[in-house]
Image (spheres, rainbow, N blue to C red):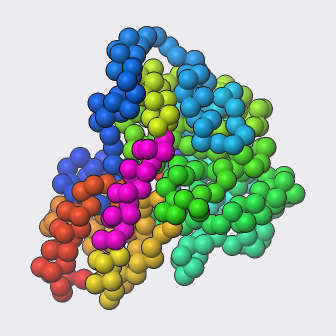
Amino acid sequence: MKLDHFRLERYFAEYEFSAPFLLCSSDCESLALGELLALEPEARERFESLWLGYTESAGDPELRQAVTGLYEHIAAGQVLVHAGAEEAIFTFMNACLQPGDAVIVHSPCYQSLTEVARGIGAEVREWRGDPLQNWALDLQDLKSLLTGNTKLVVVNFPHNPTGWLPDAGFVRKLSALSERRGFLIFSDEVYRGLEHDPADRLPAFADINERAVSLGVMSKTYGLAGLRIGWLASRNRRLLEACAAFKDYTTICSSAPSEFLAALGLRHAETIAARNLKIIHDNLKLLDRFFAAHAGLFDWQRPRAGSIAFPRLQRGTVEAFCADLVEQAGVLLLPGTLYEPGSKAFRIGFGRRNLPEALARLEEYLQRQPDRL
Ligand SMILES: Cc1ncc(COP(=O)(O)O)c(C=O)c1O
């Protein structure tokens, strides 16, 4: 399989650990090990006596049980643990697709959702959100993309990079269409739980559609990216078995300490998500104010979910803007051209505690060089 470079990861490889102010991170503020262990009285002792042998390849039973708490109709045996969402995407696509299969992918998108399918030799078509409608998808567009042999539709709600979130009616219509037309749904739900109004939480696809697969992870909503724990949840037994068989050639099983800590985190999922949503709400107030003050420079559409948004630069090129900003002010934004050529948008992240400081640097930069843009 030949894969193109993961543009966003190559960009992060250059800047993530050198730029002083990351203003485009997609994850929420992380926790220190001690904070996580403090969530339960026995946790530290249990962690220290953890056996460091191989774990079950489908995932530690305690972790799979904790994952079921995020779903309505998923049992522990319907969860397959992976090393992050990234590995789960890779195993799913490899287990599900053959060269020549027709696949439709919600776009713009996190690159592996399309690139791995392309690398396998699938024919990938894009189901594009409309930038003029806050990046909404239109089911009519999907109907016109579907062919007799469409095998898979890939969606990502809440959406990276735009933060778009449909309503539950849209999700149910999409699920009904999949049943009528016979395509599978791969639903990337890594930002689920970060709805800015909890009433907007969508049902997980694995709960409402027996053949669909939901993707979850510890990195975003729970701020525990360093654990590298993600999972597939599905009632589609055959598909999950095929993914498990493929995973024997990637990691076999996940890291025992990470599985222990992920299970601990998930038993306190609501507490951790609430902490991160508080950071998001505080940061969004600052962003609303910032973008209102610079309405002649940027187009800002406040998302309804997640920890990232995709504002548009009204003039100049976004690549030059981001490059100059990181060089002059040490603030990292992510040019939208890493998602699609010609983009005028940039990704901004607001799940981290240092956003006020990073935003102040951006403000200072704009004040210093009003003519640069
Ligand atoms: C939409 C989406 N899916 C999957 C992933 C991969 O998650 P992880 O890096 O935790 O494996 C990301 C990470 O940015 C993402 O934004």
Question: Measured along the vertical axis of the image, is residue 19 above or below residue 326?
Answer: above
Q: Position of residue 262 (x, y in %)?
A: 46, 31
Residue reaching furthest front? 41
Q: Position of residue 57 (x, y in %)?
A: 58, 21
Question: Measured along the vertical axis of the image, is residue 337 above or below residue 118?
Answer: below
> Where's the C terminus, which quadrant?
bottom left
Q: Name the residue: 31% across, 34% down.
A: 35
Residue 352 figure quarter: bottom left
Q: Name the residue: 63% across, 57% down.
A: 202
Residue 93 seen in the figure: no
Question: Measured along the vertical axis of the image, is residue 124 above or below residue 88?
Answer: below
Nearest the viewer among 346 and 309 is 309
- Confirm whether the magenta stretch covers residue 281: yes
The rendered magenta stretch, by its main secondary structure, is classed as: helix
- Give the extent of the magenta segment: 269-286
Nearest the viewer among 342 and 197 is 197
Q: Name the residue: 59% across, 63% down.
A: 200
Tell me: 199 left or right of 77: left
Q: Position of residue 208 (x, y in %)?
A: 75, 49
Q: Position of residue 356 (x, y in %)?
A: 23, 64
Tell me: 147 left or right of 245: right
- Confirm whether the magenta stretch covers residue 27: no
Question: Measured along the vertical axis of the image, is residue 260 above or below residue 286?
Answer: above
